[in-house]
Image: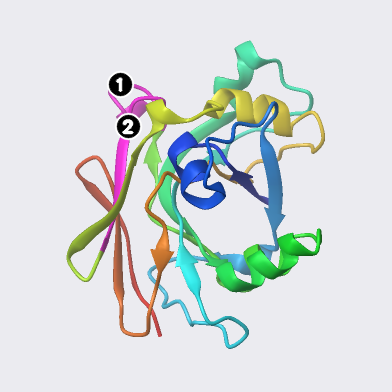
Amino acid sequence: MKIFGVGMNYAEHNKELEETLYITDEPVIFTKADSALLTRGRPFFLPDFTERCDFETELVVRISRLGRSIPLRFAHRYYDAVTVGIDFTARDLQQRLRARGLPWDICKGFDGSAAIGEWLTVSELPSGIQNVHFHLDINGHTVQSGDSRDMINSVDKLVAYISRFFTLRTGDLIFTGTPAGVGPVHINDHLEGWLEEHLLLSFNVK
């Protein structure tokens, strides 16, 4: 099972981090280790190697069939379910790595850094996957929200693009990028991830 992340896929988030409206010519793809996966409401343990660990709320899609070099027009056939996920990022570590031109792997792919909720089938989305709202509540207050209509690169484009370089297999996951509003988590925070009216993700920070 592979976990793919997508960077810079919402313009306002790019502005938030880059202090400019930054749009890439092609999707920015990174990977997380399979040990990053956090499921079934298990707690997230703040790592000791960062002083600021940020939440990044995202739509996550699940690959449902084997595919390689998938044409864009057929990409919708290769995923069957969606959920809300958190791409945890050791922000201070990321900033140091970026300043030195080094890879992001350890600040993005560490154990437990890819939290996902319960799945909804794509057929349960009346307006389709590119017209859904999602948000994150921490301790009962909404801290981040987004809409898949605002993606720079659509889910289908991401599936087609990633499959040019990696064979996609059943069960692989794609974190599709985060909107503006990222921020730090703290011990004893309770996180809830919503897709429309569905509460799909609920866990504590330890």
Q: Residues within 10 Å of mark 1 (few under 14, many from 20)?
A: few
Q: Secondary structure at mark 1?
A: loop
Q: CA distance from mark 1 to mark 2?
A: 7 Å
Is residue 161 placed above or below 38 in the rendered structure? above
The residue where tag 1 is placed is 127
Q: Is residue 146 magenta?
A: no
**From this viewpoint, is residue 44 visible?**
yes
Q: Position of residue 49 (x, y in %)?
A: 63, 84
Q: Position of residue 21 (x, y in %)?
A: 53, 35
Q: Residue at x 56, y 68 (%)?
A: 91
Q: Is residue 132 magenta?
A: yes
Q: Nearer the viewer, residue 14 or 38?
A: 14
The quadrant in which residue 37 appears is bottom right
Q: Position of residue 206 (x, y in %)?
A: 40, 85
**Do labels 1 and 2 touch, CB within 8 Å?**
yes
Magenta stretch in the rendered image: 122-137
